[in-house]
Amino acid sequence: TMTVALGAAIALPRTAGVRRTRVAAAARAFPTSRIAPRVAISSRRLDASSVRLQASDNPGQAPSLSVNDENAEEPALSPRPKPTKKPDEPVPNPPLRVAAFLAGAGFLESSYLAIEKLTGGEVTCPLTGCQTALNSGYSELFGVPLSAYGAAAYFGVAALTWWGAGMAGNEEEKDAYQRARVLTFLSTAGLAGVSSYLLYLLAVPLGGAECVYCLTSAAISFSLFVIGLSGVNGRDFGKAAPAAFSVYIVTVLSLSVLLTDDSSQANINSLKLPYAAPVIEAQSTSYSRDLAAHLKSVGAKMYGAFWCSHCEDQKEFFGAGADIPYVECFPNGWERGTPVASACSAADIQGFPTWILADGQKFEGEKTLAELAKLTGYEAPDPGALPTAPGLDASSQLDSFLSQ
């Protein structure tokens, strides 16, 4: 029999069945030898242990048996690596100083146009479309020159960009610098919206008017928008782009509603017309002169205004030289708020021309000579049988010849 002295009681776990087989094989190989294995026992679990045969240094002796724990030789499991943080995006460095100077130039240009508009002066312009654009109804908003609003907007952008440029590269003011760049992007989007709509007005309603000041302002606005866009990185752009787009759309739609061409109304409000009697081109006839004398004798009167085209047409029916019983309702000229003459006010004149007969009958609008003759009972040869065209009446021809 074979005796195996281990020097200690070793209980191999059941899971080490393979290792027991190796020990049994070693014992059968040396049936008459006493095997004194050197056992290296680890305090770790023996599940991962291995039994190895070690060659003896002395000849004739059986190889030694050792039990080694392979887990003791293996390094400990490394912890799960933490996810690496993505590096921060580089901070944009837009040329905000350049933007400040551009906005300053826009402020000076808009201020010049606003001052000229308010004082009634004329701007110096190398092209012919400047006055067309600057004097149109689209040049004012709520009675204030549109260029005044532009000057205020450019001043705000200039101050904002100058403030932001002073924080560039300062790590302590990184957040404030970011806000300045985003605000620049949003404000310049509004300027781009204004310039887009004004360019549409120049091209379509104003018939392609060439306004060098308008085009310069548009170039400044779009340049500022490009600078503002370059000042937002990918993360900021994703947050600010919807707001900037909304600012652009709201600006365009607001201007399309608020800006209207009410230049005719504006001209009427400031219009002053000095009195000037109209020049009658048609020549009177003996019939028209006799009818005018008859109307005067029966107390009929024509009330009118020197600026009234229908009144002038009524006088053309009679022709130059006919003494019409006419009452001018604005003998001192006309401007907004000027009252009518006292005679017209007493007669309650509501429109021009108005004929009032001696019996108080009132007829508004133009009347032919035949109608007036019938209304006043004037009896004379049929005017249709008489020459009424200028130059065909004998007396008219004589007057025309003598006047030459």
Image: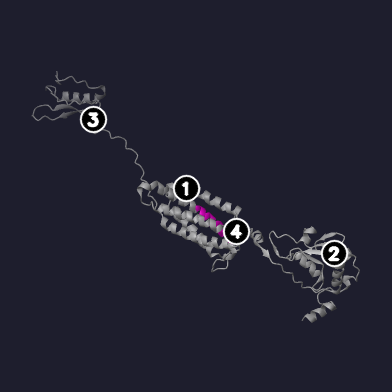
Looking at the image, the residue that sits furthest to the top is 1
Residue 127 vs residue 48, the one in the foreground: 127
Q: Residue 193 appears at what percent x and percent y?
A: 53, 54
**Label 4 neighbour load within 10 Å: few <14, some 14-19, many 20+:** many
Of the two numbered discs 1 and 2 in the rendering, the one whose residue sits closer to the viewer: 2
Q: Are marks 4 and 1 in contact (CB under 8 Å)?
A: no
The residue mark sitting in front, 4 or 3, is 4
**Region of the chain picked out in magenta, as a range:** 189-204
- Cα separation, mark 4 vs mark 3, equals 88 Å
Label 4 and label 1: CA atoms lie apart by: 31 Å
Mark 4 lies on residue: 138
Callout 4 amino acid: Tyr
Label whose residue precedes the other's in the sequence (4 or 2)? 4
Q: Marks 3 and 1, how far apart in space?
A: 58 Å
| Marked residue nearer the N-terminal end (1 or 2) | 1
Which residue position is annotated with label 2? Answer: 300
Q: Nearer the viewer, mark 4 or mark 2?
A: 2
Mark 2 or 3, which is nearer the eye?
Answer: 2
Furthest residue toward front: 342
Q: Label 1 is placed on what type of residue?
A: Ala
Query: Callout 4: helix, strand or loop?
Result: helix
User: Looking at this view, is 184 or 311 the one in front?
Assistant: 311
Q: Which residue is mark 3?
A: 71
- The residue wearing badge 1 is 240
Q: Residue at x 49, y 59 (%)?
A: 107
Q: Secondary structure at mark 1?
A: helix
**In the image, 31: left or right of 102?**
left
Count neighbours of disc 3 (C-alpha within 10 A) and say few if under 14, some if 14 to 19, many if 20 or more. some
Counting from the top left corner in percent of width and height, residue 156 is at 48, 53
Residue, x 67% and y 64% (percent of image)? 272
